[in-house]
Image: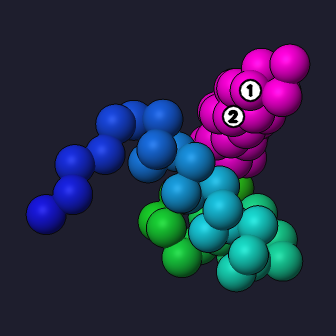
Amino acid sequence: MQSYGMSQILNNAYLDYVNNYLTVDKYSEHNNMSVEQGESFIKLARQVHIELWDGINYENKRGQL
């Protein structure tokens, strides 16, 4: 069984939302959250996703220098 840190869990949740849902309302409903909770969760997960990808892009650019 693979172990994930919180950043990876949030990143996976954000990718699930982006790839499988059209609205925060439906994502929230399917994950037993209020719409307000879903909005906050997706906002946090999106921030983590951006930070992870910024870090990957930074490492890739460093390798090209």
Query: Looking at numbered disc 2 in the image, what kind of residue is underneath it?
Result: Ile
Picture quarter with the C terminus: top right
* Amino acid type for the residue under numbered disc 1: Gly
Taking 29 as reference, is 11 above or below it?
above
Give the left or right position of residue 32, taking residue 23 as reference.
left
Q: Foreground: 29 or 18?
A: 18
Specify the principal SS of the magenta part. Answer: helix
Mark 2 or 1, which is nearer the eye?
A: 1
Of the residues under marks 2 and 1, which one precedes in the sequence?
2
In the image, is 46 to the left or to the right of 8?
right
Q: Residue drawn 66% across and 62% down?
A: 15
Q: In which quarter of the image is residue 27?
A: bottom right
Which residue reaches farthest front?
A: 65
Residue drawn at (83%, 28%), measured in percent from left and top? 64
**In whole angstroms, how far apart are the C-alphas of marks 2 and 1?**
11 Å
Q: Which of 57 and 39 is in front in this view?
A: 57
Label of residue 63 in the image:
1
Locate residue 6, reporting x and y percent. 39, 35
Q: Which image quarter is the N terminus in? A: bottom left
Q: Can the viewer see residue 14 in this picture?
A: yes
Residue range (magenta):
36-65
**Residue position marked by numbered label 2 in the rendering:** 56
Residue 50, position as x, y percentages in the image: 76, 35
Residue 52 colored in magenta in the image: yes
Dot 2: what SS?
helix
Asked whether residue 51 appears in the rendered view, the answer is no
